[in-house]
Amino acid sequence: MRRFVEEADRGQRTLLPECLDDFIDESNPVRVIDVFVDALGLAEMGFEGVEPAATGRRSYHPSVLLKLYIYGYLNR
């Protein structure tokens, strides 16, 4: 039986902390990116999709995608 992945305890209450912020250190650069992008006026800067359309599948907010892009750029 050693060749198989051992299963986790089924009595465990939660796998992750209640808040995802518990995973991120206070000095992590992702916190600066989050505050910076939230302070921008994306609609005034010409970003499309800030006001979602009433049809179709819901999309990600442009601020979330911009945060991901900046984080990826900083971490190559």
Image (cartoon, grey):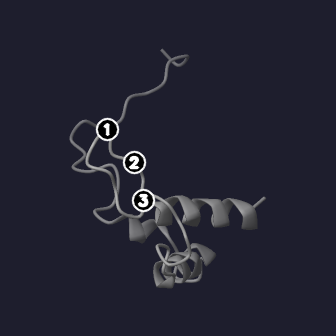
Q: Residue furthest right?
A: 76
Label 2 sits on a secondary structure element that is loop
Say few, some or many: other residues with alpha carbon within 10 Å of mark 1 (under 14 / 14 to 19 / 20 or more): few
Residue assigned mark 2: 59
Number of marks: 3
Q: Residue at horizontal 41%, vertical 64%?
A: 50
Residue assigned mark 3: 61
The reply to whether dot 1 and dot 2 touch (C-beta < 8 Å) is yes
Q: Amino acid at mark 3?
A: His
Residue 66 sits in quarter: bottom right
Indicate whether 23 appears above or below 34: above
Q: Residue at horizontal 55%, vertical 16%?
A: 3
Indicate whether 40 appears above or below 72: below
Label 1 sits on a secondary structure element that is loop
Is 59 placed left or right of 24 in the picture? left
Position of the C terminus by quadrant:
bottom right
Q: Nearer the viewer, mark 1 or mark 2?
A: 1
Q: What's the mark number on residue 11? A: none
Residue assigned mark 1: 56
Q: Amino acid at mark 2?
A: Ser
**Distance of label 3 from label 2 (alpha carbons):** 6 Å
Q: Amino acid at mark 1?
A: Gly
